[in-house]
Image (tube, coloured by chain):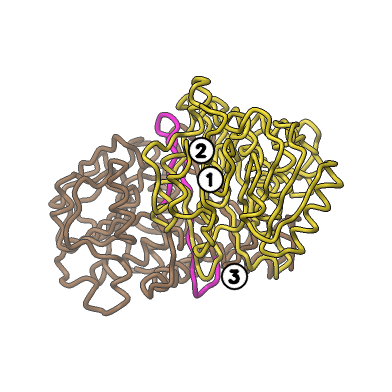
Chain colours: A yellow, B brown
């Protein structure tokens, strides 16, 4: 049995240039495996030592794929001052049958990509039929990867509206997006203006205990899909009941987050995203429905993408082989 | 800010030759930090994909030491057939203030050493005044490290009694122990015979759902200390109320284990091991008391020892520097 483990740095993973459409396929595959009852995923656990810094461990197993991972990350709004991205971390990938470590890798690429890929999967099944306008609230890493992933699933998207608490950040973001994607892009001074007229809205600010929680259901146009990547940090506590349907990638984990002060209210009809794979009738019902998808980000999405990265890196001879 | 992380393999860590007494000191230091309310330690989480294999993630933070770790391991009785130790795994050590990864290291050395060190801390405060006889139930890695650690704390230990479900394993173990430690050592065909007359008993078999659960309180002599490292796998369900005092390293985690089918009954007077640091009166009360210490093994013990290893390895230039 091999006594070796593969180490992949962020630049190793970048060098693989795995395309977003492959990440979207793997993420949908993981969500489908989960919907067949072939995933194991304990609740994330958190350590909050001081201020807004958190550490979190997320583990997940895909029983059909035979892979299991643990991702250990830390995030803080303070990271920017340290010259670091909002989240840093590493991921451990193991073989499910033998328990042995297969790879240790940077987790930031996976987190950025699979979270956007999961937004794309939600939008594939839950957005209106020809979405044209996307609003991004929070113009960081996720703002960039979500735009990229959504344009792959919905090539009809041709207008970008953006908001950030730092207006200069929003301006730089829309300039970059217009240049990269060749779409009309504009930043707005308020969240309410940014989300107006958008067919798809993605909130991707930091996850903090004192979020603004301002977005009302009626701010969104009929037919809009709102995907929150930052729990309910941008969502008015009453708004959750102003949608025609509310989905989440994992019902159990949303309920678990109540213990940490998020999601004071949840609708009784909360549906799991995986149900959309079971029958077409489980996805969007009417073109004018306002739909909310609370995408927490799942450990098994990490597992599926890490498995893909490990296989690709080994095929290409990328990374550092270490003795266990 | 450094963009590097230190990798330490098992053989890197072995080469440091960190003495057991240093591990015992760090383990006691972590338990003391916890007893002052300066530790954060979410419940372990488990993935049990099939058979007796488990994966577990354990994270912990020491607020005064400024270190935080996540240990990701897999164990199975099947590992022996694969030529692997019962538990394999890796540990991630991060800086508490910035969240950055400091080190990725083999976890098996730490697990073997800190578990034995915690037994020694329990025995330092809870064993009778001059223990002479030690019984080891389960003659694997922990059987070896526990003997070593206990002999450091109680140099009066001069007789070893051992049992293993594989009698040949027990025989090899006692031969090795007699030769290494120069003590009288004998293996026995039953648990009951092995534990009779022992001042300190350590059970360190595999953690399995179908444990024998046979040890009765009255099998132990007056004044004995029983330390279980394998939850209640060797403990009769009624035995837990046959002790004069029952301690555990973490009350919350013992209670959490009920969800996984362990510890059907727990005494009302369950005390946390850390209370022994607060006042002498919290430790052993009478020489004839039979005392049970359920040592689950804590994430913060890993944290303290990993911190020591990282500092020692950097001072000695051991390990592989990797880019994040």
Q: Which residue is mark 1?
A: A296
Left/right of residue B322 with respect to residue B31 in the rendered view: right
Q: Give the chain letter at badge 2.
A: A
What x and y, as percent, mark residue A255?
40, 46
Residue lying at 55% horizontally and 71% vertically, measured from the top left: B66
Of residues A260 and A43, the one nearer the viewer is A260
CA gap, disc 2 and disc 1: 7 Å
Check disc 2 and report its element: helix, strand or loop.
Answer: loop
Relative height, residue A294 to residue A87 (above, below): above
Task: Confirm whether residue B155 shows in the render.
Answer: yes
CA gap, disc 3 and disc 1: 25 Å
Q: Which residue is mark 2?
A: A249
Question: Is the residue marked by circle 3 packed among few (<14), some (14-19), or many (20+) residues within 10 Å?
Answer: few
Q: Which residue is mark 3?
A: B97
Report the span colored magenta.
B44-67
Of residues A4 and A52, the one nearer the viewer is A52
């Amino acid at each position: 049995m091999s006594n070796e483990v593969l180490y992949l740095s962020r630049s190793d993973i970048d060098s693989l240039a795995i395309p977003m459409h492959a990440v979207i396929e793997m993420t949908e595959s993981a969500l489908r495996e989960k919907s067949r009852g072939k995933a194991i995923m304990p609740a994330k656990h958190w350590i909050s030592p001081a201020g807004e810094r958190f550490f979190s461990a997320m583990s997940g197993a895909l029983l059909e794929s035979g892979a299991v991972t643990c991702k250990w990350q830390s995030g803080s709004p303070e990271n920017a001052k340290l010259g670091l991205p909002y989240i840093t971390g590493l991921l451990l990938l193991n073989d499910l049958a033998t328990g042995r470590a297969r790879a240790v890798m940077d987790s930031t690429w996976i987190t950025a990509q699979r979270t956007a890929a999961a937004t794309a999967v939600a939008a594939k099944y839950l957005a209106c039929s020809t979405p044209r306008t996307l609003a991004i609230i929070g113009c960081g890493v996720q703002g960039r990867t979500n735009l990229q992933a959504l344009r792959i699933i919905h090539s009809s998207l041709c207008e970008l509206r953006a908001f950030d608490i730092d207006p200069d950040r929003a301006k730089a973001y829309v300039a970059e997006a217009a240049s990269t994607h060749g779409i009309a892009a504009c930043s707005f001074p308020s969240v309410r203006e940014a989300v107006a007229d958008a067919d798809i809205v993605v909130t991707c600010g930091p996850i903090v205990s004192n979020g603004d929680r301002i977005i009302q259901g009626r701010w969104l146009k009929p037919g809009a899909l709102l995907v929150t990547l930052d729990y309910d940090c941008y969502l008015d506590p009453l708004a959750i009941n102003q949608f025609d349907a509310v989905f989440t990638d994992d019902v159990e984990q949303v309920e678990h987050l109540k213990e940490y002060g998020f999601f004071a209210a949840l609708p009784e009809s909360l549906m799991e995203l995986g149900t959309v794979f079971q029958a077409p009738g489980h996805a969007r019902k009417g073109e004018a429905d306002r739909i909310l998808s609370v995408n927490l980000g799942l450990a098994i999405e990490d597992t599926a993408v890490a498995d893909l990265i490990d296989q690709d890196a080994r095929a290409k001879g990328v990374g550092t082989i270490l003795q266990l």
